[in-house]
Amino acid sequence: MISLSEFQFFDPQNMKASKLPDKPGNYLVILRSSSLLPQCNRIHIIPKLALLEYLGEKYEVIYTGNTKKSLRFRIHRQHLEGNSGISTLRKSIGCLMGMQLILSSTGGKAKFCDEDEKCITGWMMSNLGFLYYANDEYKMVEKELITAYHPPLNLQNNSDAINAGFRETLSALRSLKFLNDKECFVSNTFCPSCNISLIIADELKDEEYIKCLTCGHIFKNPLHECTNRSTEKKKWKWPMIFLAICLALFLLMKIGEDSNGNSGDINIQNGPSSTEAMAGVRTYLKHHYLKDPDSYQSMNWGPSGIYNKENKTYFMMHKFRAKNSYGGYVIEEWLFVLNADGRVVQMINDINDIK
């Protein structure tokens, strides 16, 4: 077993990235003495964290990693400054913090929204330290470190029986099958002022605002917001399903009426191309509809075609995700009516508004 005397300590709070070597090697991710791993109420297993002693201080180990190129790049650029699409450590921490993964529109790996990624970075800077060891035998050393410390966030190449149940549940939580699960599962949060982890008691989950007892900062209770969102979703679930069915039937009939030689693509006759129509929809949303234009995320582009032959208008369905006026993300789907230049002239989500 490699001796800890071979490792060097990196503190992201007060050390520059240049402290880390630009060499291959291994690293251990440790919790500061007063820090706790985030908890998620989808995982009912508390992981066992191994203790190590380094220069007279005791630390709990949560993860170990290796790199064949650069410890500096891996630790600082990918873990501390990157996103969850390139750092499995960040992805695990975000899931434990109750955050929702988002599929990349370009087919890349799932990650969290920018706001959540900033929160993960803040938590890591405040709660984590790194022990690194530059060497060329990093694969062999990693096996030794996993066996010695059974880190709960190492999901790959880890067959250790300790924390096996926790790792299995966390792996499922990180998998894509949870991306469409819209139920809220936040069991704790982090103070936006001092970034300390706060466990919200059940009796406080209906309170609109909560107070951090460490720094006194008062902020919106995420459990309250999620409870309201869940209630609203259940209330409108069946009416929205009925509306979607009616709208789909109407579109099928309208496409059938206008299908004399047309393919259903919006790029027909003198109408806008699909690219022009999509650009027009995005422009309209960001300048005339969204409360927070920078939070816009495209999810799906639906059917398109002729809306009204007489006034030369066209339609395109679009599903997107963005923040509402309360700062929470919502998913919406609209039918956009466009003119021949690709400019939006009307947004429709009520079957009665279709003419």
Image (cartoon, rainbow, N blue to C red):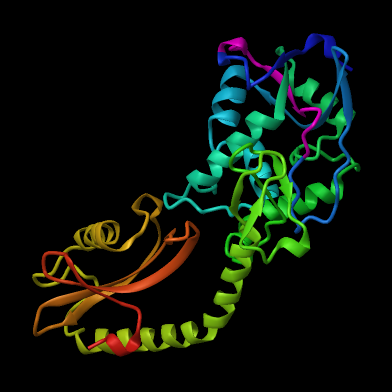
Confirm whether residue 144 shows in the render: yes
Residue at 58%, 12% in the rendered image = 22
Look at the picture and state if 161 lies above or below 327. above
Look at the picture and state if 152 lies above or below 285. above
Residue at 76%, 49% in the rendered image = 39
Look at the picture and state if 69 lies above or below 174. above
Q: Which residues are magenta?
A: 18-36
Give the side of residue 175 with respect to residue 154, left or right. left
Look at the picture and state if 221 lies above or below 124. below
Give the side of residue 142 with respect to residue 246, left or right. right
Residue at 63%, 22% in the rendered image = 13
Residue 307 locus on image (x, y percent): 20, 80
Give the side of residue 270 with respect to residue 315, left or right. left
Quadrant where the C terminus lies? bottom left
Quarter occupied by residue 210: bottom right
Quadrant where the N terminus lies? top right
Residue 67 locus on image (x, y percent): 65, 23
Residue at 36%, 85% in the rendered image = 247
